[in-house]
Image (spheres, grey):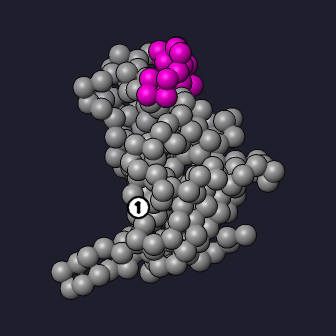
Amino acid sequence: MNDNSSPAAVVARDLEKRVRGPEGDLDILRGLSLEIRAGEAVAILGPSGSGKSTLLGLLAGLDQPSAGEVELFGQALSPLDEDARAGLRAGRVGFVFQSFQLLPGMTALENVMLPLELAGQSDPEAAARDGLEQVGLGERLFHYPNQLSGGEQQRVAIARAFAPKPRVLFADEPTGNLDRRTGEHVGELLFRLRRDSGAALVLVTHDAGLAAQCDRSLYLDAGRLEGDDE
């Protein structure tokens, strides 16, 4: 459910991203603006190479735009250095990636504990155990990523993303590396936990079924957004 009385979770104004290529500058994003309200789920669709993952990285403060501004929870990111941006994200922003991004030398429990420890939570192990129980992996706490299936690894990643109780979750093709049936189960889990937490969701996907579960969809093509941005 959207909370229109709260400040926007994410705002982008006149966002541009330009990279230098062998034949000159390449504009990936051009004058892009959007607002994602607290508790809102927004899907970003578009063809491969349209800049969806680039946009997600900019909105999350993982990369910096060539021009324009991004605000997270009302805080402009451009005046902040990398450490300050990381501090702003800590405990308030969650991530789920297509490639899982689990640390191979850590167990499932330790992977979920990590962001909790970084956020200074008082009992990270208890919260991590609870998070893994919620995704059906309470019996796999001490397994390493290479001992888990792809679907199980993504469930660990989802538990890790939600454990700090983020206000916004950024998900980049969260079912892209999974078979159809596993992807459907992971998608159901992602949206159930999002509804329970009330977090905003920014979802990059090619999956029309996942996009249909969002409050609205935006279409990115040639560096510009189209669709319902109201």
Residue 161 placement (x, y as % from top left): 50, 36
Question: Residue 53 at x, y = what percent?
Answer: 42, 61
Q: Residue furthest right?
A: 5
Look at the picture and state if 4 lies above or below 228. above
Q: Please tell me how crowded label 1 is: few (under 14), some (14-19), or many (20+) other residues with Cα within 10 Å.
A: many
Point out the stretch of residues depicted in magenta: 116-138
Q: Along the line of sight, which residue is nearer the eye, 96 or 184?
A: 96
The quadrant in which the C terminus is found is bottom right
Q: 56 or 102: nearer the eye?
A: 56
User: Which of the two residues, 141 or 162, is positioned nearer the viewer here?
Assistant: 162
Q: Is residue 120 left or right of residue 97?
A: right
Instruction: Name the residue furthest front.
Output: 79
Tell me: residue 25, above or below residue 102: below
Residue 145 within the segment the image draws in magenta: no
Q: Which residue is mark 1?
A: 64
Residue at (43% x, 57% y) in the render: 57
x, y percentage for residue 173?
Answer: 44, 54
Majority SS type along the magenta span: helix
Q: Residue furthest bottom?
A: 23
- Viewer can see residue 192: no
Residue 210 located left or right of residue 47: right
Residue type marked 1 = Gln
Q: Position of residue 71 (x, y in %)?
A: 58, 57
| Residue 228 visible, this orientation | yes
Q: What residue is drawn where x is 37% and y is 79%?
A: 27
Q: Quadrant of residue 143?
A: top left
User: Is label 1 in a helix, a strand or a loop?
Assistant: loop
Q: Is residue 209 above or below residue 162?
A: below
